[in-house]
Image (cartoon, rainbow, N blue to C red):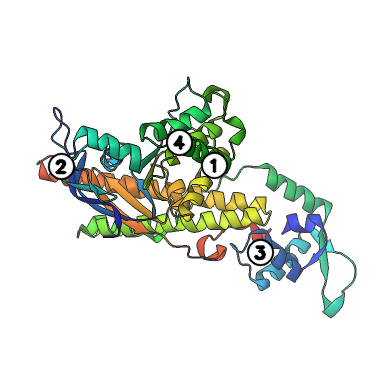
């Protein structure tokens, strides 16, 4: 939000719609959260009201000098948050391998199909963004595709491991 | 029968070595005009399958029928004739003859198949024009970029109007932008009705261009997925999450 307000003064609803447009519909923001954040940023001296209340009592904000510095600091540092693996497949796989009821194969095959279809859908979105001249969104969808490719490789690695265990069992080897 | 390619329990075991089959009882049908991708890691049986469909090799057991021709027990000479007339090859490293010009490279399969010279010349001009490389006709392959060489290879693959084009990692030796152009040309040919079998280890390539992805694993068909143009919205596929809204 600071980044958007560093570009030009915006009121709350404009912040929401501009943010969502920038992300190509991949991040929906609650308007209540936007207003609460604006109040907090104003309290911390990072943004300030720009002019008087206008049409329908709307108040526009802009970033202060301190706000711009804060935004530039944020831009300058690489993201070091822990990687998030939120997909349910990780949990399902862990639980299915503990119960060991033989459903792993079907689970992985199904997941693999989802990955393949998703790659195709992302390619379509990437092509559309390209046609629309949205190079920033092209990069976003490329990033998403790389993640799906990684998931696919991981599913294949799981299948590989599963096949190895089955072979070990058939040949009487000691599978872990 | 509407299948262009039909494998029934096709198995290929190579002599001397492991008992494991390179291809293990594969049953698969590929329809006319389909763009199918065969995907799998190295050693999964992709090349073996390709060689069987191309008539470069015969199954140890089972059956392979392509474009109505049963390749299973065909003589070497008949297989060679079948390959020349019914199959077009596009390889990763182009495989052009360096001592022949572009035009001559494209004409080779037509000459081998006995096409009348005038007809072959006309068809080669039409193809080079269609693939956007008409101006390279008199040059030698070494004077061309990778993308141009692959287009020459495509013209050569198409000159005998094959029933099936086999594309084996066709973008593997190209940079990504040129690879996309080559794949777009293949996709266009497919839209015009050309059956294409694309062999690749690249999931992104396979899913972007093929409507069907057959995955091989340890010599077996592990999955056979038909993909759709689902038209899913960005928000249904990707959610960017984080704390940034709070700043």
Which of pointers 1 and 4 indicates the residue nearer the eye? Answer: 1
Q: Is residue B35 left or right of residue B132?
A: left
Q: Which chain does the numbered disc 1 sit on?
A: B
Residue A114: x and y in percent read: 40, 59
Q: CA distance from mark 4 to mark 2?
A: 47 Å
| Residue B56 visible to the viewer | no
Q: Which chain does the numbered disc 3 sit on?
A: A
Q: Is residue A84 left or right of residue B51?
A: right
Residue A113: x and y in percent read: 37, 57
Sequence-wise, the earlier of marks 1 and 4 is 1
Q: CA distance from mark 1 to mark 2?
A: 57 Å
Contact between labelled residues 2 and 4, with CB atoms less than 8 Å apart: no
Q: How many marks?
A: 4
| Residue A50 visible to the viewer | yes
Residue B210: x and y in percent read: 43, 53
Q: CA distance from mark 2 to mark 3?
A: 51 Å
State the quadrant of the C terminus of chain A.
top left
Q: Which residue is mark 4?
A: B156
Contact between labelled residues 3 and 1, with CB atoms less than 8 Å apart: no
For the residues beneath circles 4 and 2, the answer to whether they share a chain is no
Which of pointers 1 and 2 indicates the residue nearer the eye? Answer: 1
Image quadrant in which you'd find residue B44: top left
Specify few, some or many for label 2: CA neighbours under 10 Å numbering under 14, 14-19, or 20 or more. some
Name of the residue lying farthest toward the top: B99
Q: Which residue is mark 3?
A: A20
Which of pointers 1 and 3 indicates the residue nearer the eye? Answer: 1
């Amino acid at each position: 939000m600071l980044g958007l307000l560093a570009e030009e003064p915006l009121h709350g609803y404009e912040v929401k719609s501009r943010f969502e447009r920038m992300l190509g519909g991949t991040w929906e923001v609650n308007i209540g959260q936007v207003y609460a954040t604006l109040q907090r940023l104003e309290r911390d001296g990072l943004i300030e009201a720009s002019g008087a209340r206008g049409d329908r009592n709307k108040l526009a904000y802009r970033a202060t000098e301190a706000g711009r510095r804060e935004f530039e600091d944020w831009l300058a540092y690489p993201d070091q948050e822990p990687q998030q693996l939120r997909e349910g497949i990780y949990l399902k796989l862990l639980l299915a391998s503990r119960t060991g009821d033989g459903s792993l194969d079907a689970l992985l095959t199904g997941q693999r199909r989802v990955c393949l279809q998703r790659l195709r859908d992302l390619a379509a979105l990437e092509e559309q963004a390209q046609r629309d001249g949205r190079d920033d969104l092209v990069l976003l969808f490329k990033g998403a595709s790389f993640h799906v490719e990684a998931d696919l490789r991981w599913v294949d690695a799981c299948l590989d491991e599963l096949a190895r265990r089955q072979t070990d069992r058939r040949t009487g080897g000691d599978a872990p | 029968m509407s299948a262009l390619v039909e494998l029934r329990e096709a198995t290929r075991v190579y002599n001397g070595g492991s008992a494991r089959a390179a291809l293990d009882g594969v049953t698969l049908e590929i329809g006319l005009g389909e763009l199918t991708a065969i995907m799998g890691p190295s050693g999964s049986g992709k090349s073996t399958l390709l060689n069987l469909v191309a008539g470069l090799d015969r199954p140890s057991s089972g059956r392979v029928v392509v474009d109505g021709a049963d390749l299973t027990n065909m003589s070497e000479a008949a297989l060679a004739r079948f390959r020349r007339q019914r199959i077009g090859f596009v390889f990763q490293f182009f495989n052009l003859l360096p001592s022949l010009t572009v035009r001559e490279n494209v004409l080779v399969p037509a000459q081998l198949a006995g096409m009348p010279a005038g007809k072959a010349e006309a068809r080669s001009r039409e193809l080079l024009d269609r693939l956007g490389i008409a101006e390279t006709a008199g040059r030698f392959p070494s004077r061309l970029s990778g993308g141009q060489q692959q287009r020459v290879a495509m013209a050569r693959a198409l000159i005998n109007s094959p029933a099936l084009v086999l594309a084996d990692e066709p973008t593997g030796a190209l940079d990504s932008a040129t690879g996309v152009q080559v794949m777009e040309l293949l996709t266009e040919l497919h839209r015009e009705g050309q059956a294409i079998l694309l062999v690749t280890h690249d999931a992104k390539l396979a899913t972007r261009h093929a409507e069907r992805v057959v995955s091989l694993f340890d010599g077996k068909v592990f999955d056979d997925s038909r993909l759709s143009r689902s038209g899913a919205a960005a928000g249904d596929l990707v959610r960017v999450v984080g704390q940034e809204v709070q700043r």
